[in-house]
Image (cartoon, coloured by chain):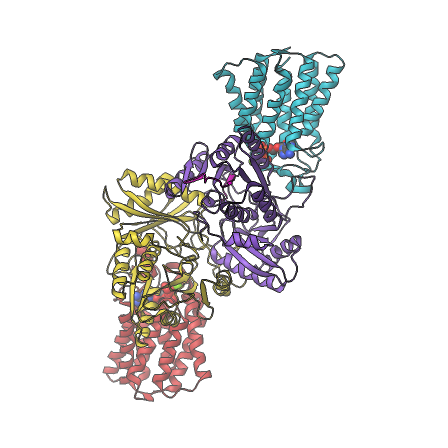
Chain colours: A purple, B yellow, C cyan, D red
Amino acid sequence: MKKFINDPADVVVEALQGVALAHPDRLRVDLERQLVLRVGGPVPGKVGLLSGGGAGHEPLHSGFVGPGMLDAACCGQVFTSPVPDQILAAAIAVDAGAGVLQIVKNYTGDVLNFEMAAELAEGEGVRVRTVLVADDVAVEDSLFTAGRRGVGATVLVEKIVGAAAEDGLDLDACTALGEQVAGASRSMGIALGSCTVPAAGRPTVDLGPDEIEIGVGIHGEPGRRRQALAPARELAAQLVEPVVEDLELRRGERALVFLNGLGGTPQLELYLMFHEVHRQLKERGVDVVRSLVGSFLTSLDMAGCSLTLLRPDEPMLRWWDAPVDTPALRW
Amino acid sequence: MKKFINDPADVVVEALQGVALAHPDRLRVDLERQLVLRVGGPVPGKVGLLSGGGAGHEPLHSGFVGPGMLDAACCGQVFTSPVPDQILAAAIAVDAGAGVLQIVKNYTGDVLNFEMAAELAEGEGVRVRTVLVADDVAVEDSLFTAGRRGVGATVLVEKIVGAAAEDGLDLDACTALGEQVAGASRSMGIALGSCTVPAAGRPTVDLGPDEIEIGVGIHGEPGRRRQALAPARELAAQLVEPVVEDLELRRGERALVFLNGLGGTPQLELYLMFHEVHRQLKERGVDVVRSLVGSFLTSLDMAGCSLTLLRPDEPMLRWWDAPVDTPALRW
Amino acid sequence: MADLTAFQAWVAQSARSIGEHAAHLTDLDRAIGDGDHGANMERGFTASARLAEDEQFSGIDTYLKKVGMTLVSTVGGASGPLYGTFFLRLAGPLSASDDAGARELSQALRAGVEGIVARGKAERGDKTMYDAFAPALAAFEEAAHTGRTIQECLDQAARAAEEGRDATEPMVARKGRASYLGERSAGHVDPGASSAALVLRAAAQTLA
Amino acid sequence: MADLTAFQAWVAQSARSIGEHAAHLTDLDRAIGDGDHGANMERGFTASARLAEDEQFSGIDTYLKKVGMTLVSTVGGASGPLYGTFFLRLAGPLSASDDAGARELSQALRAGVEGIVARGKAERGDKTMYDAFAPALAAFEEAAHTGRTIQECLDQAARAAEEGRDATEPMVARKGRASYLGERSAGHVDPGASSAALVLRAAAQTLA
Ligand SMILES: Nc1ncnc2c1ncn2[C@@H]1O[C@H](COP(=O)(O)OP(=O)(O)O)[C@@H](O)[C@H]1O
Ligand SMILES: Nc1ncnc2c1ncn2[C@@H]1O[C@H](COP(=O)(O)OP(=O)(O)O)[C@@H](O)[C@H]1O
Ligand SMILES: [Mg+2]
Ligand SMILES: [Mg+2]
Ligand SMILES: [Mg+2]
Ligand SMILES: [Mg+2]
C-alpha cells in the first residue's frame, strides 16, 4: 500500500485539519467530533441540513457543506459510520428552530447510528427527520433485507434539498422532497480496480488483471457479477440498461445524468464514458436535460465509475439549477 | 491495462465529445481540430488567451476554458503536443483584434509546435505572444538544455492572466504578467504509482511495491531519485524544502500554495498532505495567503501529488481572487 | 445473585475474551462483511471495561447505561448501536435492585434482546447476532422458569448462543452488509453472532 | 540530377524505411524519451508519401513545402516541427529548378539543416538528430566541393549520418525529453539521429 499518510489511525482527523486550513472562510471544522460546519450557520429560520457517513468518499459529504447544500457533515473513520454523539452534536449545531433533516445512505451502520442520534436529538428538543437514500440497483430491492445501498443519488438529494432549504421550505416539505428525489433516482457502478483502506493495507477486492466488478458498492462490496474487461461502449451499456430499466425510464422522458468517478479514474475516461452514456440514452429516447460529470462520491482510490439517473420534475430542476457555493460544487 | 476506452487511438476525440455534451452552454468543441472554445467568444477588445498541450492532464487545459480564464484549449493526443494547424486555428478563433497570448508548458514538442503556430498566425495578421512555464525544480535549470518542465504553475498563470485579460490588460501587459507569475512559481511532484498511457497499454514508470519517485514529471518522466515510501510528513518535507529553497522564500514572506493531485490520489490524502505542507511552511515562517487543493493538472491515473508555490504580489492576488467560471474552476 | 461488581466483572471478562478473539472476529467479517468487527468490538469493550476503573457507580442500572452509551459511541458500525441498545435496555428491569436474581436477569435479558430487535429489525434466520441472542434468551427463560440456579441459567444461555452462532454458518444473510452477498454469504459463520456468543459466555463466567 | 519524381521517390523510400524500423525507433525513444518516435515518424512519412499519389505538383519546391507542412501537422512532438522545417527550408534553394544538381542540393541541404538549428537550437553533442544531420551536411558539401557525383555526395552524406547517429550513444542529452535523464541518457543511441540516418540513406537510394 502506497499512500500519503502517517499513522492509518489518524488519516481522517489529519485530513480534516487540511480541510480546515484550506477553507477557513467557508468551513468550520470540529476536529474532536469530526464535524464540518458551514461558517455563519445555523441560518435563522432555515431547516438544518445534515449528512455524514464513513470517510473515504470525499468530496462527499464534507466538500458539500455551504450555502445551497449542507449545513454540516459528520465524518466517521474510513468507511465507518459516525457515531450518535457526533451526529447529535451536529444536529444541535445546525438547528435554527426549523428542525433538522438528516440525509442518510442506506447502510445498516449509518441507519442505526443516525436513528439513535435522532432519538437523542429529539430528547434535546430538536425536531429531526431522516431521508434514506437507497439507489444502488446492483442490490435487489426487498423489504426483508437491508435493502439497497445508498450511492450517487445522495449527491443529488443533498444538492436539490439544499437549495430548497435555502429557499425556505419547511422540515416536512424538505423531507418529502428528499424522499421524492431519492425515490426517483437509481444508480449502478463498475470497478476496474480495488480501493485500499489505509487501516487494512491491502486491496479490498481481489480483481484479476483483466477482471472488473459490475455493480460494485462504494466500499468495494460485491456487485452483480465479475467479468472480463470490455470496451467502454459495452460497459456503458451495462450501466445504462439496468438503471434505465429499474427506473422504468420510457422513451420521451427526461433525465438528469450524474456520471461519477470512483477516485482512481481520470477525467479523460470519465468524459469518454459520458459520451457513451449520453449516446445510449438518446438511442433509448431519453432526453438528458442536466448532467454532472466528475469524481464527487469516491471510494478512496478505486478505479471505476458509477451512473446515477434522476427522473426530475420541474421543482427539482429549478433547485438543481439554484446557486450552490461549497468547496466541491459551486455554481 | 484496465480503462474506460474503446480504441486507444480515439480516446481524446471521444472524451472531447463527452466534454461537448456535458458543457453545451459553456464550451464549443471543434472535434476535427480538437479545440475547446469559450462560448460567446472572442470577446471584443480582450486579449485572447490560449493554451494547450497533450491530453491526459485534465482538467488542464480544457476544463479551464471560460470567463476569467482561457478562451481556448488545443488538445493533442495523450501526452503529445498539439500541432501548429490546430493552434493556428485556435489563435484565429480567439483573436478579437487585441492579440493572442499562448501559455505554453516547457517541453520541446510544445515549444516548437506553438512557435511554428505563432509564426503562421503572425503571417495571418494575428499578433501572438508566448509565456513559457518552466517551474519544475526537479530538473536542473540551465540555458544549455531543454530546461525545466512546465507543471503546476501553468494553472496559476492561466488563472491570474485570465482574470487580467478579462480586466482589459493589453497583450504586452498580459505577457509581462504571465512571465512574472511563471517566474515567481516553483513546483515539484512525487509519484507513488505510475500512469498508464492508453496507446502503450502498460505502466510508464516501473516502480516497485514500496518505491516512489521524488521529482516525477507529469508524463512519468524521471525525477531526482527513487526511494522507499515514507510517512506523509517526510514526503511533504521533500516537496516543501526544494521548492521553498529554489524560490528563495524567506521567513516572513507570503505564498500561494497549490497542492495538486496527479489523478489517482484521493482527496483524503491530498488534504492530509496539505495539512503537512501548511504546517511546514508555517514552521519556516511562510504565510500561506491563498491555497488551492485538488486534482487540477493530472497525469492520467498516476497516484501522486505536486506542490506549487507562488510568491504573489498584490495584483496577482487580486486577479487570483477575481471571478472565474469554467467547468473545473469556479468562484 | 449478581451485584454491581459482578456486572463489572462481566464487562471486563467480555473485553478480555473479545480481545483474544478479535482477529478471528475480523476474519469472519472479512469473509462476508467489511473486516472491522474485531477492531470495532475490541475498541468498544476496552473502553467499557475501563469505566469501572475510572468511575464510581451508584447502581447496576447506571453502570449498564454508561456501558451502553460507551459502546454506542466507540464501537461504531452496525454493531455499536445494537450492542449499545442491548446494554442500555438491560438496565431497565434492574433499576430497583443492587443484587439481581434469576428472575430479574431473565427480564433484563429479554429487554436487552428486544432492544436489539427494535433497533435492527432482524428475524431469526437473518444471519445476525440475533441468531445467537434469541436462543440464549429462550434457554435462560426456560431454565429460570424451571427453577435452575443463576449459574445454570447462564450456562445454558451461553451454550444456546454458541449453538445459535454455529447455526448461522449455512444461512443466507438478509440483514447487514453480508446481505449484499446474497447466496454467497452462506458457508460462513456470522461475526456478530460470534461476538454475542463470547459476551454471553463471559456472563456465565462472571455473573452468577 | 534530381527531378520531382526523384524527390517523390525519396519521400516514398523514407516512408518505407521508417515503416520497417518504426519499432526500433520507438524502442530507442522508450529508453530515453517517451516511446513515440517510431509511431510519430511513421504516421508523418506515410501521410507525406501519399501526397504524390493524391496530387499533382508543379515543381520540386511546392512539393517539398507540402511535405514539410504535412510532416508538421502529422508527426507531432518535437520531431514534427524539426523535420517539417527541414523539408520546408529544403524547398527554398530549389525554387528555380526542376532538376537539381549537386550544388543546388548542397545549398538545399544546408538550408534544411540550418532550419533544424534555427528551430531546435541544438548544438553538436547535444544528442539530437542534429548530430546526424550536421556531419551529413559537412560530408555532402565536402564531396560536392571536390567535384564528386551526386550519388557520391549522397552516399558520403548517408554514411556520415550513420556515423553521427552511432556517435550519439555515449552522449549526455542536453536537448529534448532525454535531457531530463541527465547522465542516465548516456549509453543509448538517440532516436531522432537514427531516423535522420534512415532519411539520408533513403536519399542516397533515390535522389541521384
Ligand atoms: N439489522 C441487524 N440486526 C442485528 N444484527 C445485525 C444487523 N445488521 C448487522 N448486524 C450484525 O452486525 C454484525 C456486523 O458488525 P460490524 O462489522 O461491527 O458492523 P458493520 O457491518 O457496520 O461493519 C453482523 O455480523 C451482524 O451480526
Ligand atoms: N531541440 C532539439 N533540436 C534538435 N532535435 C531535437 C531537439 N529536441 C528533440 N530533438 C529530437 O527529437 C527526437 C524525439 O522526437 P519525438 O520522440 O518524435 O518527439 P517527443 O520527444 O516530443 O516525443 C529526439 O530523439 C531528438 O533527436
Ligand atoms: Mg464490519
Ligand atoms: Mg464497518
Ligand atoms: Mg518521443
Ligand atoms: Mg512525444
Q: What is the count of numbered marks?
A: 0
Q: Quadrant of ligand 6?
A: bottom left
Q: Position of residue B75 (x, y in %)?
A: 42, 64
Q: Which residues are magenta?
A: A37-57
Q: Residue D198 at what x, y percent from top left?
A: 38, 73
Q: Position of residue D110 (x, y in %)?
A: 27, 77
The residue drawn where x is 31% and y is 62% is: B165
Can residue D149 be seen in the rendering of this structure? no
Which residue is outermost to the right? Answer: C146
- Please state which of residues C133 and A168 is positioned toward the viewer in this rendering: A168
Residue B249, horizontal then vertical, whole percent = 24, 46
User: Is residue A179 in view?
Assistant: yes
| Quadrant assignment, res B164 | bottom left
- Image vertical order of residue C102 relative to residue D152, above or below: above
Q: Is residue A56 magenta?
A: yes
User: In the rendered structure, does residue D33 fall within the stretch colored magenta?
Assistant: no
Residue at figure coordinates x 33%, y 83% from the top left: D151
* Displayed quadrant of residue C173: top right
Question: Residue D130 sits in which quadrant?
Answer: bottom left
Q: Nearer the viewer, residue C161 or A108?
A: A108
